[in-house]
Amino acid sequence: MPIEVESPEEMGYSTIQYNLAESSVHDRTIGELGMDLSNVLMNYGHHRGLPELQQAICEGSHILKSEDVLVTAGAAQALYLVATTLLNPEDHLIVVRPNYGTNLETPRGIPCEMSVIDLSFDNGFQPDIDQIQKAIRPNTKLISITHPHNPTGIFVSQSTIESLVQLSERNGFYLLIDETYRHLNFKTPLLPYFAEKSNRVISVSSLSKAFGAPGIRIGWVISRDAKLQHDLLAAKEQMIISNSVVDEYIALQIFLQKEKLLKEVHSTLQVNYQIVENWLKANDTIFEWVTPDAGAVVFPRIKESIQVDFSRFYDRLYSHYHTVVGGGHWFEQSQRYMRIGFGYPSVNEFRIGLENVMSCVMDCKMN
Ligand SMILES: Cc1ncc(COP(=O)(O)O)c(C=O)c1O
């Protein structure tokens, strides 16, 4: 996938001065969390995850219980476990695109039958429920959506979610809702996990995006379906037996400080989102965009009427301006789109990075 080759993880973070490619907030150090790891016993951890961590993940819910939570190595592993546990070559999946790579690539690797439903800019990136309904087949096993959505930051409308839940119950398939960005709700209160709605709904999330801790590789999958939980656990045991106990300990400390950490994160997002919105408005002869509901990314596009040499644009942005955004091709979309992450850079880096994007568009504009 292009994202694997061109992402900062591959290019090297130190080679990028203005990193507008991340979909997360800035990474934290262990020191910031003020913890002492010296008494962490390096045993195998609990297979389902540290019980206090399972508890912390579903805290506040009157419906979810600890046993509905399986701790995984990031949301990426959770998604891999769900796809490989549920889908066989004779099964059919409906997946909404653009999407996070794993949600498309793991089913492709199985390979199962797959219907891709493309979101459209003109429809505000809302999934079209009629289109989804028409794609359902007798062997449909899973529908996969992301909320808040990556790369647009859009919330799938509540009415669409309700319809999808009803469809999954009526047809007996699962509805996977990738909620990896759920804690980046800088405009609205935090929604309950969608897995509360039905035992056909599977929620996936992680500490990577909102808590500045992608490197500890802690995510989780929530399902109230005991049989599915059992199968996911069996799959996890084949892969890693248990999570890193160090990662789980740090994750628990993050949960214990959750309110304070998220307060800081949300105020940074509010400031930085305003900066990018002002920038887009100032450049609205070039760009058009759909305002995100949450998350740390916006997915504007360069208007059709504007001719740009896009391969030169992305090369030059990196090599000349030391700036990176997530090109549309990372998400199987036209290179006119770019994902701009507003949670990761400092205010100063962000302002310069945005100026660089604009200068580079001008350098590569052909009309
Ligand atoms: C929608 C979505 N799901 C899952 C992941 C993987 O996250 P994690 O770092 O928790 O594995 C990402 C990372 O970019 C993502 O965007």
Image (cartoon, rainbow, N blue to C red):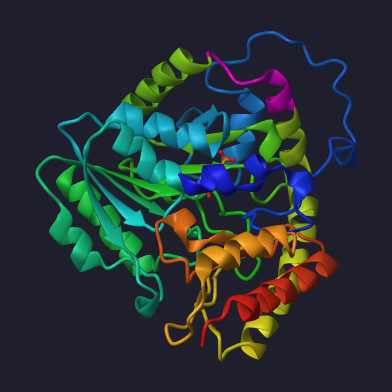
> Residue at position x 44%, y 46% from top?
101
Q: Where's residue 81, x and y in %?
A: 41, 29
Nearer to the camera, 353 or 73: 353
Tell me where residue 74 sits by quadrant: top right
Q: Is residue 345 left or right of residue 366?
A: right
Q: Where's residue 29, x and y in %?
A: 84, 39
Q: Where's residue 13, x and y in %?
A: 74, 45
Does 135 appear above or below 317?
Answer: above
Nearer to the camera, 68 or 139: 139
Q: Is residue 358 left or right of residue 194?
A: right
Determine if the magenta segment contains residue 100.
Answer: no
Q: Is residue 231 visible?
A: yes
> Residue at position x 71%, y 41% from top?
213
Nearer to the camera, 155 or 117: 117
Q: How many marks?
A: 0
> Residue at position x 60%, y 69% from top?
188
Residue range (magenta): 241-249
Quarter of the image where the N terminus is located = top left
Q: Is residue 202 visible?
A: no
Does 45 appear above or below 103?
Answer: above
> Residue at position x 52%, y 48% from top?
3
